[in-house]
Every structure is written in structure tokens, then in C-alpha cells.
Image (cartoon, helix red, strand yellow):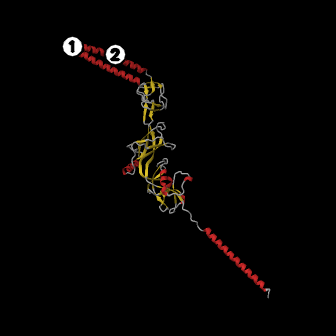
């Protein structure tokens, strides 16, 4: 019958439609799955970039920061050699004086009288000598004519000699009186800076008094007495004997002072000597330094720290301070970049800090690349990309792709930075 055919056609069309829809859905699911796989696939990251320096052996001074006290080069207490009343002070307290300048004036009247009396006595003895000389010469003539006895001549000759002796004694008395009069002018014994006046006008200085009128100190140049332990000095001598350190020239200016505010004093000093006796209570030896002080910036008794260059390590290795890492036990170590571009931790033994860098005693060899910046991005065995490290270079000027062999210049520039505190 004809009515059954349309029903079959609709059924066939509906089945094909469902099949097509299902196929499209499967294709969409497959495409979505492919996209998800592409989204979740890991993307390889480039190796982290670190800043390195290539270490090399170079001469580095052996520096020590030691405590010290400033001491005057010369010190003189001004005292009076004669007694009397102080009538005048002729200096400004705290001013500079020259050797021989009159500082105090003592009443000279008694000494002027004493000098006049001595000169009168000298004139009297000189007159007596003239008379005795004439008498002796007269008797000598008479003795030659046999009109005077030998005894008379001997007595006259003795009187002449006695008169000459009295003249000599009178001259000495006169010279003493003249000297005492000159001592009424109390003069500066040395050139330097004078302190406060310890006596004022109207003070009576008694005979035999040991009172100090003022103090003069020579402050240019000036001494600084520093102390160092006996153990350090002995180790220094052993290093010199073994050749690990080279000696400095004896006349070299090898000491700088560190002031209270941390700045360096403008002039360098020279080590004069080290004491031969150690302090039994501290086990330290005193070293004396002579240093210029043209502007009186250093005062006696002032506490300073002295940075002393005691030798030269001719083949030392140094790295920037931030290159040194510390283990949990506090032991120093550095990150090394191996020839294959991977990093490793290397234990080292460090010495003092010189010119802002740690001196490495053991653990490094010339030519090795040490990481200075970028520690947060690396781990042991990781491959890294290196660039040369330059101290205080602006961020926009720093190169981003360079070979580690270019870092020799950076290492050299680092060692030319201002001196850091040696430990």
C-alpha cells in the first residue's frame, strides 16, 4: 500500500541525521582533546643567568686594623730655674710657640742687684791682680840686680797667682748671677703647642720648687702607639720566612688612621719599630707609628684605629664579599661554574677583607669562574648562562650575554675600590 513508503523515508532520514550529529560531536571532542594536550605540554625554560668573575692571582697587601692611642712626639714641662714672683705671662693658652719664646717673666730686680754686686767684686779682684802683678814684676827686676831676696820675690809671685784665682772666682760668680738673671725669662724648651697656664701672675715660686708652669707638646709629626698580639706578630714573621708574604720597604708609608666617623685620615704614616717587651697582662706588643699632623687634627690621648700594611701577598686570590656564602655551620663556600656550564658549591678558607674583597686562602685556583650574583636562581648541578660581573654598573649598561672569560676586567676593577675594614 502507498501510505507505508513515506514513513520508511522519514525513518531513514532521521537515522542519518542522528548519525551525522554523533560523528560531528566525536570530531569536536577529539579536537578539544588535542587542544588540551597542547595546552598542558611542558615548555622548556632557558637556563638562569648569573654574574661571574674569573679569579686570578695578584699582589694584595696584608692589612690589619689595630687599636691605638695618639702620643706627642716630644713633651716638655715648663719649670722655673729660679725663685721669685711671677709678674707676667706672655703666651696665649693653647697657641703654638717656638723654642726660646719667653713664656713667663719672673721679677728680675733681686737678680739684677746680685749681678751688680758680682761685677763689683770682679772689678775689685781685677784691681788687686793688677797690683800683685806689678809688685811681682818689680821684685823680679830687683832679684836680677841682687837687691831683693828670693823669698820676697816668691811671696810676690804667690800673691799674683792668688789674685788671678780670685779674679777667676769673681768671674764665675758674675756669670752665675748673669745666668740667674737670664732665667727670670722662662722660655719654651721646645717648639710645639702649649697647654693651659698652671700658674698666674702674682704666684711666688719658692727656691727648690718643682711646680709646673705649663706644658708644651710637639704635635707635628706625631706618634700613634698601636698594639698587636704576640701570636699575630710571630705568624707574620713565619710568613715572611716561608716566602708567603713579601716585606715592605722600611721607608714606605704603610699606615693609615681610621677616624671615629669611619673616614681615613688624610696623611699616611710610617711604622718606626715594635717594642721588644710584651705586656704580661694582655700578651700584646706596642708598635709605634710616626704620622704627619700639619693641621693639629690628632690630639695626644686620642683613640684611633690604625690600618697597617704589614706585607704583600704576591699571588693572592680575592673575590667580592657577596660571592662568599655560609653553610649552616658558618663555614664559607662559593658557587663555581664548571667548564660544562653547570654550577657546584666549593668550600673555601678565607682570610681578611682587603679592598672590599675576601682574600681566599684555600679552595680556589686561578681561572675558575665564581658566581657573584644570581644565587637565588641556581641549585647544584644546574646549567646556567654567565655574564661578567661589574661593580656598581647601571642596570641598563650591564651586558646580558657574554663569555665568562671577559670577567678579568671586572675582577680587576673590583680590587680598585676604596679600602674596606680588614679583619
153 horizontally vs 84: left or right: left
**Residue 27 image point, x, y percent:** 66, 74
Report the front residue among 251 and 190.
251
Instruction: Please tell me whether residue 19 is drawn above or below residue 183 in the rendered image.
Output: below
On the image, the x and y values in percent for residue 360 come to 45, 54
Q: Would residue 137 be found to the left or right of residue 382 on screen?
A: left
The front one of 250 and 179 is 250
Label 2 secondary element: helix
Determine whether label 1 and label 2 are within 8 Å by CB: no
Which residue is painted at 25% across and 17% down in the image? 157
* Closer-to-camera residue (349/372): 372
Nearer the viewer's eye, disc 1 or disc 2? 1
**Mark 2 lies on residue:** 124
Image quadrant in which you'd find residue 186: top left
Q: Is residue 100 above or below residue 344?
A: above
Q: Earlier in the sequence, mark 1 or mark 2?
A: 2
Q: Residue 287 — which label? A: none
Which residue is under mark 1? 143
Q: Position of residue 317 (x, y in %)?
A: 44, 53
Q: Is residue 418 left or right of residue 11?
A: left
Task: Estimate the spatial distance between the alpha carbons at disc 1 and disc 2, rounded to whole Å.
Answer: 29 Å
Q: What's the residue at 32%, 17% (across, down)?
A: 126
Q: Quadrant of the N terminus?
A: bottom right
Q: Residue at x 42, y 35 (%)?
A: 74
Note whether residue 282 is visible.
no
Classed neighbour count for the residue bearing mark 1: other residues with Cα under 10 Å, few (<14), some (14–19), many (≥20):
some
Residue situated furthest top in the rendering: 147
Q: Secondary structure at mark 1?
A: helix
Amino acid at each position: 500500500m502507498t501510505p507505508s513508503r513515506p514513513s520508511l523515508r522519514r525513518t531513514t532520514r532521521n537515522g542519518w541525521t542522528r548519525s551525522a550529529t554523533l560523528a560531528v560531536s566525536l570530531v569536536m571532542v577529539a579536537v578539544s582533546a588535542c587542544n588540551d594536550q597542547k595546552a598542558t605540554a611542558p615548555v622548556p625554560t632557558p637556563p638562569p643567568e648569573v654574574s661571574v668573575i674569573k679569579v686570578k692571582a695578584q699582589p694584595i697587601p696584608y692589612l690589619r686594623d689595630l687599636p691605638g692611642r695618639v702620643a706627642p712626639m716630644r713633651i716638655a714641662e715648663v719649670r722655673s730655674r729660679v725663685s721669685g714672683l711671677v709678674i707676667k705671662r706672655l703666651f696665649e693658652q693653647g697657641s703654638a710657640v717656638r723654642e726660646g719664646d719667653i713664656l713667663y717673666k719672673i721679677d728680675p730686680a733681686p737678680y739684677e742687684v746680685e749681678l751688680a754686686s758680682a761685677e763689683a767684686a770682679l772689678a775689685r779682684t781685677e784691681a788687686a791682680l793688677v797690683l800683685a802683678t806689678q809688685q811681682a814684676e818689680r821684685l823680679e827686676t830687683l832679684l836680677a840686680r841682687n837687691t831683693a831676696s828670693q823669698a820676697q820675690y816668691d811671696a810676690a809671685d804667690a800673691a799674683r797667682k792668688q789674685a788671678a784665682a780670685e779674679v777667676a772666682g769673681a768671674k764665675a760668680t758674675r756669670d752665675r748671677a748673669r745666668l740667674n738673671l737670664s732665667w727670670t725669662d722662662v722660655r719654651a724648651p721646645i717648639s710645639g703647642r702649649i697647654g693651659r697656664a698652671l700658674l698666674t701672675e702674682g704666684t711666688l715660686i719658692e727656691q727648690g720648687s718643682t711646680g709646673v708652669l705649663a706644658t708644651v707638646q710637639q704635635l707635628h709629626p706625631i706618634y700613634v702607639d698601636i698594639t698587636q698580639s704576640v701570636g699575630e706578630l710571630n705568624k707574620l714573621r713565619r710568613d715572611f720566612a716561608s716566602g708567603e708574604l713579601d716585606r715592605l720597604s722600611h721607608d714606605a708609608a704603610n699606615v693609615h688612621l681610621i677616624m671615629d666617623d669611619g673616614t681615613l685620615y688624610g696623611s699616611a704614616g710610617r711604622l718606626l719599630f715594635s717594642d721588644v717587651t710584651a705586656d704580661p697582662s694582655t700578651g700584646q706588643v706596642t708598635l709605634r707609628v710616626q704620622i704627619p699632623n700639619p693641621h693639629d687634627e690628632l690630639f695626644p690621648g686620642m683613640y684611633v684605629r690604625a690600618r697597617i700594611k704589614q706585607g704583600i701577598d704576591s699571588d693572592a686570590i680575592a673575590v667580592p664579599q657577596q660571592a662568599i656564602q655560609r653553610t649552616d655551620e658558618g663555614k664559607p663556600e662559593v658557587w663555581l661554574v664548571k667548564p660544562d656550564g653547570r654550577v657546584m658549591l666549593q668550600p673555601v678558607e678565607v682570610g681578611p677583607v682587603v679592598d672590599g674583597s675576601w682574600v681566599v686562602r684555600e679552595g680556589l685556583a686561578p681561572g675558575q669562574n665564581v658566581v657573584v650574583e644570581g644565587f637565588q636562581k641556581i641549585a647544584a648541578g644546574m646549567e646556567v648562562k654567565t655574564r661578567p660581573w661589574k661593580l656598581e654598573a647601571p642596570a641598563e649598561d650591564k651586558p646580558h650575554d657574554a663569555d665568562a672569560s671577559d670577567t678579568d676586567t671586572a675582577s680587576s676593577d673590583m680590587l680598585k675600590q676604596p679600602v674596606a675594614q680588614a679583619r
